[in-house]
Amino acid sequence: MKFAVVARLFLMLPWLLVILVVVDIEPGRLSARSPIPPDQLSRTLKPDPLSNQSIPTIYAITPTYSRPVQKAELTRLANTFRQLPRFHWVLVEDSAFRSRLVTELLAHSGVLSYTQLHVPTPRRYKRPGLPRATEQRNEGLRWVRRNRSLRNSGVVYFADDDNTYSLELFQEMRLTHKVSVWPVGLVGGRRYERPIVKEGHVVGWYTGWRPDRPFAIDMAGFAVNLKVILSHPEAVFKRGGSQPGMQESDFLKQITTVQELEPKAANCTKINNILPITGQLELEILFEKRPHQHPVQSQHDFPTPILKGPSNEGACLAHADREGKPCI
């Protein structure tokens, strides 16, 4: 009899263990995309004790949305931003809630100062052909205006999450007095787009799409002084009447003129930021798949960009001066 009881206990033991494990795990189990519980919704802001208090703070507003490569692209950005002193990352999710994925990524990113926001894009604006990330950029601007004053010094930059940036870009943009501009690589079906500069002033645009735009520039190609943002509270990215590719012009028209733009990156001859690698696919289509429209007769028609770095910066500048084209 005793043996039978013991045998039954041994048979029931594995099932009891399974039940205990399930009960222990299930209540706290959340996916990476789950909403954060209310007690974890507060903004995290860590002080940066080693930062140089004399330099302006960069406020990078980054719209982001859920997709398979979101974590990879935000990690790439974080690995750049964590190296910058006096830097505040305003990350705005296209969502009705803060996701666990983004919250945990920020907490372990190494970026010392950040704010996590969220605002969903209305469904009617998610159709193809309409501007993207409008609500998220405006939410970032709203946070800046509510939490900073004219006593603060800084620069606002719209850093999309799928771009690549060099550290030198951020060093230069800190010196922005009003609105500064520079070239951007792999954009508009070209190797680069840039402001055309003569005698230190922007006089036109080298671009692959609608050079007649008031500001024919990409979102990654300009930064705005914090005081300008605060002094123009009505300046936002518009939905009504705005078209894809025109949001930059619609925004900049509210705060500056072309004559007031400040060329950076050696009079716009260096490329310190590059748009997504999909831009390379566009180049292959334009320059290889359709040779009758863009014939390449020799390597001199589209010279290979010289990679800029400490060892060849002189060669980069020499190439830019000789060819009249930026180097990457």
Image (tube, rainbow, N blue to C red):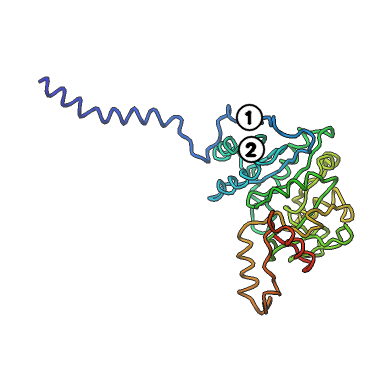
Please say if 273 is above or below 284. Answer: above
Q: Residue at x 66, y 43 (%)?
A: 81
Determine which quarter of the picture holds residue 106.
top right
Of the two numbered discs 1 and 2 on the same chain, state the one appearing first in sequence. 1
Residue tagged 1: 42
Rendered view: 309 above or below 189: above
Q: Is residue 295 left or right of residue 104?
A: right
Q: Secondary structure at mark 1?
A: loop
Figure disc tally: 2
Quadrant placement of the N terminus: top left
Q: Which residue is mark 2?
A: 111
Q: Is residue 100 above or below residue 183?
A: above
Left or right of 101 on screen, residue 283: right
* Left or right for 8, reference 185: left
Question: For this rendering, which residue is in front, 172 or 153?
Answer: 172
Please identify the quadrant where the C terminus is shown: bottom right
Classed neighbour count for the residue bearing mark 1: other residues with Cα under 10 Å, few (<14), some (14–19), many (≥20): few
